Image (cartoon, grey):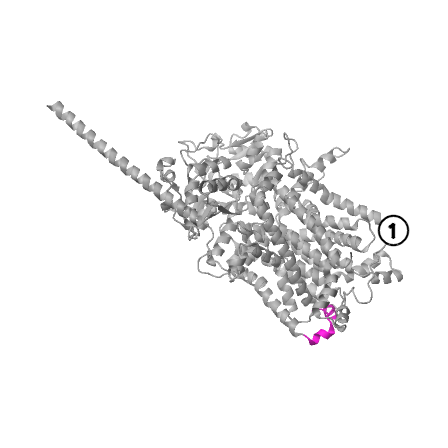
Amino acid sequence: MRLIAGWKRVWLIGAFVLAFVCVAATELRAQTKASDKEWVAVVEAAKKEGKVVVAGSPDPVMRNDIIPKFTARFGIPVEFVAGRSSQIVSRVETERAAGIYSIDVFLAGPDTSANELYNDKMIDPLKPLLVMPEVADGSKWKSGKVWFVDPQEQFIVRAFSSVATLLFINTEHVKPDELRQMKDLLNPKWRGKISTEDPTTTGAGANKAARFYVQIGEEFVKNLYIDQKSVRTRERRQMTDWLARGTQPICLDCREDDVRPLLKDGFKILEIFEIAGAGPTINGSPWMLSLANKAPHPKAAQVFANWILAKEGLETYARGYGSATLRTDVDESFLNPGNVPKKGVKYFDDTDWKWIVGGRHENRDKVWKLLKAR
Amino acid sequence: MSRAATTAMPRSRRFHLRPIRLAEFSFLVFLAVVMGLPLLFLLTGSFNLSAPGKPAVYGVDNWLRAFTDSGTLSALSMSFTLSVVRLIPAMILSVSFAWLIARTDMPGGKFIESVCWIAYFVPDFPLVLAWILLLDPTFGFLNSLAKSLPGVEGSIFNPYGFWGIVWVHTSTGGIWFKVMLLVPVFRRLGATLEEAARVAGANTATMLWRITLPVLAPMIVAVSVLSFIRGLQSFNTELLLGTPAGIYVYSTKIYDFLQREPRAYGEATALGSVFLLVLAVLLFFYWKFLSGGKKFTVVTGQGFSTLRVKLGKWRYVAFAGCLLYVAVTMLLPLTFLVIGSFMRRYGFFNITSPFTLNHWHSMLSDPIFLVALKNSLIIASTTAIGGVLLYSALAYLLVSRRTITAPLLESFCWIPHVLPGILLSLGVLWLFLATPLRFFLYGSVWGIAAALILADSPVTTQAFKAGLLQLGAELEESARVSGASWRYTYRRVLLPLLAPIAAAVGLMNFGSALTSISTPVLLYSHESRPLAILLLEYSFTGELERAAALGLLITAIIGTMMLVGRKLGLHLAGSE
């Protein structure tokens, strides 16, 4: 009897679980269908708006890959307003003061996104608009959900997280084992042989110097940028050419997408992500995504935002730019393994909200004071 | 205005002032709005301390921050030094070139003049890089050649530094612009005075010093002022060659404030105001100079001789000298630029298969390219024609009227020359958006053309003014006495005499419109993107080879237009 009663209980529980699973599955399917339906409706409405206006940095990936793919997929033309962030924001603010709202989507750097677009209330919450099933699905994201970096977790999406390059070396002139620790950079042998984007003005050079200031200290920054006579430039191509020729075989701020063609041409360039004395760093390059408020083409903007966060959009960008995305379903085999963050490693996050809105500026000002005083 | 200007005014017209006065005040209102308002916006904005979109709070903090920023004063001093050092040899060379081309029997003058025109419009960024390839201490082509000479050890040339900047400036833009402006006015100079001087026993040098230069002084001084201020604002070359050597100029400081996040336009405007101050001082002396009882009329109704100064056997030496200068300063880097556009990586000859047609192919097959080309041609043609019509009329007013508004009119004209391009663009953007015409102007090719016409006002007005100062009043008077209407007189007398200058400044404006980046940068839209913005995008993303190809294509367009324009100018002038 007891055995029968036990089996009865098992059957009952099993039936209950089965019923629950069936209901949940039905509900999920209904939700998915609703989500699909909602997405289809958004796409239809977007097509009626005729176009989407995207503002961002003038990079070839956007021009050559993203725009043609998006237009081919949805039949919605993309107008791309390209320029330096500061120029685009000036323009948008002036337009808005005159009651003109021309931009739908911003693909901007962390500084512009946090300190200008968010701070000046130029953007709308994006979270409720992410309805494309493969974007809304938390399992498709390494962090379990779309990563909104702003305090309300509504406005600005971070879609990338790559290990940042610490420096590049030309191995015909510098052997990797000559740079085992950060203080090796201060070897008199490298005096005048290190190139950097000018750290005395806004940009990657100043950002890296601010990081060194926090991570290693003022004395190191002084020694590296002043005593070592690091050669400064504001032209990124100039730095890459110096690296290739070996004139300045150590480059602190060369960009990976600029160096990649050199590797194809057989130059002996090595990308270094970490050296003892400076912790590894991740960042959200190349952009953060936000939607303009009072956008002239809100549905088209919504479609673009969803698509660029989906597998096709992000993978296209990741391949072109060489950055690791935060999606779980993007193939990363084409990336330099060093670019992909490793589990269990503690990284300094160069795109962390608090760092962007406060720490970086404070430390950059200290660096400027230090360097300009000399 | 000056006494010289008064003499150029037909006396009979002093009794028919109304239409001209109406035109004068219309111009004043127009210029006050289009030139004065953007400046006012900028200056007011520079005192606004609050964040964008917040209620305005006024104070002087931006100004204090700008001028107490470390390095501002040393950068200003460096800019002045560089500008003066560059100006002196460049003016001597330019006047010599213009004189040789227009006033002497040197062979090949037209060829040299054409080269000057083409050279001016070669984009400077890839050209500076070409100079680096030639002069770099480690891999520079000329240094490598020099090292192969006996007794030479180490590198001789170094572009990174003060003298490197001076040299590259002299090559990229030092004399071409000045020669372009000076040659037409040198041509207008009748030979009568020179012949009289020669009869009186003066040699060529005395004649040049005592006759030619003094009567052409308005244009020479105007070109010097234009060049000096342009030198103060110079930026690209200093950025590439100065930064590695720790040389910072004033424009770099302004650029830094413009690039900051959040933007610091207030500080940038404060620093830019120094240019206004410099301009005010220079204009004061310029006006004093013109009103000092001098007379600059060289084209009168009493016969016009175009006989040129005979140089004898020195004519070939002069030609060889000009040719050598052009070859070294322009053809050499230009050759590198042409080669660079066909290289997989600009300046890298040691990689496998270094040459390719890909950059040209990808540029020409880029769907944006054809749209940008069409936009650029519309913008450049509108700018050229609009600028000539507007500023020839303005210059006529400035020269032919004695009125208290002339200094104001002229001051307004100079404003675009002293505002850094991006600030001018911002000012014009504010202006467009504040008018009912904003839906027509903002983001359209017409808006960009309008902004470029404004930006061209100093050079165009000064060129026409200098040309008009050369014309004698009796030319108009005799036409009027013969019963000609003002329009008929303008068409049959003034226009043919001004045609070479009109052709020159029209072409110059056409070329500037094709290559200008800072003026349209805040005004273009996806539909109205011109070639120069495409060039900026290529440079920004490090696609230097494609930028070189596009730069060469722009130069070729300008070269073609130059040939057509010269032909037209000569036709209008009746010289054909």
Check disc 1: other Cα within 10 Å, few if <14, some if 14-19, many if 20+.
few
Q: Quadrant of the N terminus of chain A?
A: top left
Under mark 1, the amino acid is Gly
For the question of whether residue B143 can be seen, the reply is yes
Could you tell me which secondary element the residue under label 1 belongs to? Answer: loop
The answer to whether residue A274 is above or below residue B379 is above
Which stretch did the figure color magenta? B1-16
Residue B330, horizontal then vertical, whole percent: 72, 44
For image coordinates 25% across by 33% down, the residue present is A21
Pointer 1 residue: B312
Residue B510, horizontal then vertical, whole percent: 65, 53
For the question of whether residue A192 can be seen, the reply is no
For image coordinates 60% across by 64% down, the residue present is B31
The question of residue A363 being in magenta is answered with no
Quarter location, residue B356: top right
| Image label count | 1
Of residues A158 and B188, the one nearer the viewer is B188
The answer to whether residue B200 is above or below residue B108 is below
Quarter location, residue B12: bottom right
Of residues A363 and B573, the one nearer the viewer is B573
Q: Quadrant of the C terminus of chain A?
A: top right
- Looking at the image, residue A277 sits to the left or right of residue A265; the answer is left
The question of residue B10 being in magenta is answered with yes
Q: Which chain letter goes with mark 1?
A: B
